[in-house]
Image (spheres, rainbow, N blue to C red):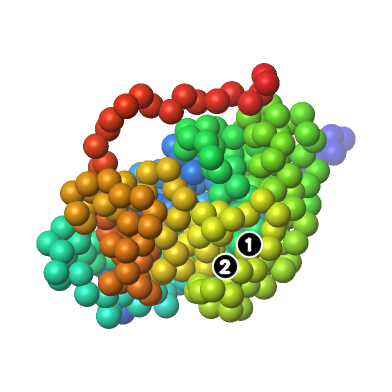
Amino acid sequence: MIATTTPERVSDATTVYDPAEPVDLAATIAPLRRGAGDPTFRRDGVAVWRTTTTPSGPATLRLVQREDGAVRAHAWGQGAEWAIDGVPELLGAGDDWSDLDVSSVPLLADARRRSTGLRLTRCRQVAEMMVAAILEQKITTLEAHRSWAWLVTRHGTPAPGPAPAGMTVAPTAEGWRRIPSWDWHRAGVDPKRSRAAVEATRVAPGLERTLDLGRGGAEIAKRLRTVPGVGIWTAAETSQRAHGDPDAPSIGDLHLSTLVGTALVGRAVDDDGMLELLEPWRGHRQRVVRLIYRAGVRPPRRGPRITIQDHRFH
């Protein structure tokens, strides 16, 4: 007689999120996607798929926005319940734009009018967002996305449930620490960034506890920056996504100050100039940045493009 086995059932959970205020699913969670080849994020027709590493284990989350604006969520895996519990914050619950006044700047006012469902996501994954941000330090976005996809695909775990082919769950904190030096090298990540990523995972429990401090602020930024190799830019990129920080513009970004200057005064400015321009909206500065992106502002293209560095063969 031929022995047979019964496939193990994958735990699942569902919910329907129907907020009082409109939410734009695609625009709200767009910052969580690390490039078109991100193995943790996929658009499949009307559905958005996202994998996540939770305190309970890996999970796959499928989100579909209905015609009435509500979002149906279905999750699979050991972390399914955690993922479902986090859907409201993932889609901007608690992100209050009501006292943001951009009426004095027509470009911002128009972007706000056309983006009524835009919210700041709070994905509650501090260490994972920090590792992804560290990979983006001082290199082009294309390089960083390539590194992220290579490492997650090679060292992550298969997405649970009926996820689209090729989707992977990012490594746990321990999984990131187990990546050998030669694989960081093959992924194009230099030793300085790989050390910073490993240091972030060593203190992952402490990083996750910063979620208890709210959606952002000086204390959260201070604690994030205690990780060796994490400065003001990386802390901001982390808190924007993990905490839903509404007031953490990415100071030190290669392009952001030029983008903000172009949008608000028609010319490039440096970081100090950017902060001066954003000061009237203190408390909402990251919201204003998101509106600038939504307005489709592009800085003038001058000079040669940055050359992509390939650290794998250096």
Q: What residue does disc 1 label? A: 225
Q: Is residue 31 visible?
A: yes
Residue type at mark 2 is Ala
Local SS, label 1: loop
* Quadrant location, the C terminus: top right
**Vertical side of 141 occupied by 97: above or below:** below
Residue type at mark 1 is Arg
Residue, x 67% and y 19% (percent of image)?
Answer: 313
Question: Crowding near pointer 1: few (<14 within 10 Å), some, many (20+)?
Answer: some
Residue, x 42% and y 77% (percent of image)?
Answer: 94
Viewer-nearest residue: 178 or 216: 216
Q: Quadrant of residue 192?
A: top right
Mark 1 touches mark 2? (CB < 8 Å) = yes
Residue, x 52% and y 63% (percent of image)?
Answer: 239
Q: Position of residue 208 (x, y in %)?
A: 66, 68
| In the displayed structure image, the side of residue 211 where residue 300 appears, left or right | left
Viewer-nearest residue: 239 or 91: 239
Local SS, label 2: helix
Q: Position of residue 230 (x, y in %)?
A: 63, 54
Q: What residue does disc 2 label? A: 221
Q: Quadrant of residue 189?
A: top right
| In the displayed structure image, the side of residue 114 where residue 204 appears, left or right | right
